[in-house]
Amino acid sequence: MKRRVAILISGRGSNMSALIKAASAADFPAEISLVISNKADALGLERAKAAGAKTLVIESKPFGKDRAGFEAVLQAALDENGIELICLGGFMRLFTAEFAKAWYGRMLNIHPSLLPSFPGLDPHGQALRAGVKLSGATVHFVIPETDAGPIVMQGAVPVSDHDTAETLSERILEVEHRIYPAALSLLATGKVKIEGDVCKTTGSSASENFLIAPVAN
C-alpha cells in the first residue's frame, strides 16, 4: 500500500512539482493525495491541478495569530483525506509545538542549506557572507524549533567565488528536487528511524567518497 501524502505550500510549489513527478512512478512508495495551500493565489495550486493532484485552500490570513485555530481546520482536512505523511514545500507559516509534536516523525521539510548551518531566512546570503566553499540542501523532520529537526538527507554543491544568492539558489534547487523525493521514499518504506535526535537510515550509503571545493589546478 502506498502511503498517503499531503504537500503544504504557500508559493510556486517547485519542490511540490518534483514530489508529484516522482510519485507518478508506479514503483514509488507514496502517493500525493492532497496539496494544501494557505494562500488562494499560490502559483503552485495551478501546477498541482495541471498534474492531476487534488488541491485545497485553507486561508491562514483570517486566523491572524491564532495558529491553533488554523491547525484545527488543517488537521480536519488531513484526517478527512486519510493523510499519513506531510511534506512542506515552501509553506510559510509556523506551527504550534503541539501540531509539530503530533506529526513528529511523519512531517518533512526541506531547507536550502547544509543544516545546522544557516537556518532561517536568506540561507544563500548567509552562506556567501560566511565564505563557505560547499552549500546545499537538507531534508529534515519538523520539530517546534525552526530548521532544527533530525536530518534525513542532504545534498551538496560547490560555491563559486562568482556566485550570487540567485545563482547559488538555482543550483541548490536542482539538488532539492533530487533529495526530497528520495527522502520521502525512504520514509514511506520505513527505512528511516529516529534515535534520540539523530536520524538513521537502513541500508544507506554515500553516493561518492567525498566532495571537495575548490579544486586546485
Image (cartoon, rainbow, N blue to C red):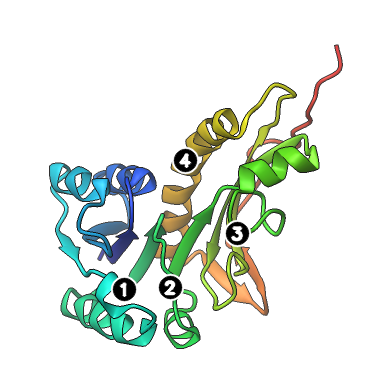
Q: CA distance from mark 3 to mark 1?
A: 27 Å
The quarter of the image holding the C terminus is top right
Q: Residue at x 34, y 48 (%)?
A: 19
Q: Quick check: 199 left or right of 12?
A: right
| Sequence order check, earlier mark of 2 and 3 | 2
Element marked by disc 3: loop
Frontmost residue, 168 versus 28? 168
Residue bearing the label numbered 2: 106
Q: CA distance from mark 4 to mark 1?
A: 22 Å
Q: Quick check: 13 left or right of 176?
A: left
| Sequence order check, earlier mark of 4 and 3 | 3
Return the x and y of residue 28 as percentages of the image width and height.
Answer: 32, 51
Frontmost residue, 171 versus 203? 171
User: Tag 3: residue type?
Assistant: Gly
User: Tag 1: residue type?
Assistant: Glu
Would you say the residues marked 4 and 1 are in contact, meaning their CB atoms lie under 8 Å apart?
A: no
Return the x and y of residue 53 as percentages of the image width and height.
Answer: 16, 53
Element marked by disc 4: helix
Residue bearing the label numbered 3: 120
Q: Which mark is residue 178?
A: 4
Residue bearing the label numbered 1: 84
Against 31, residue 133 (above or below) is above
The quarter of the image holding the N terminus is bottom left
User: Tag 2: residue type?
Assistant: Arg
Q: Residue furthest top?
A: 217
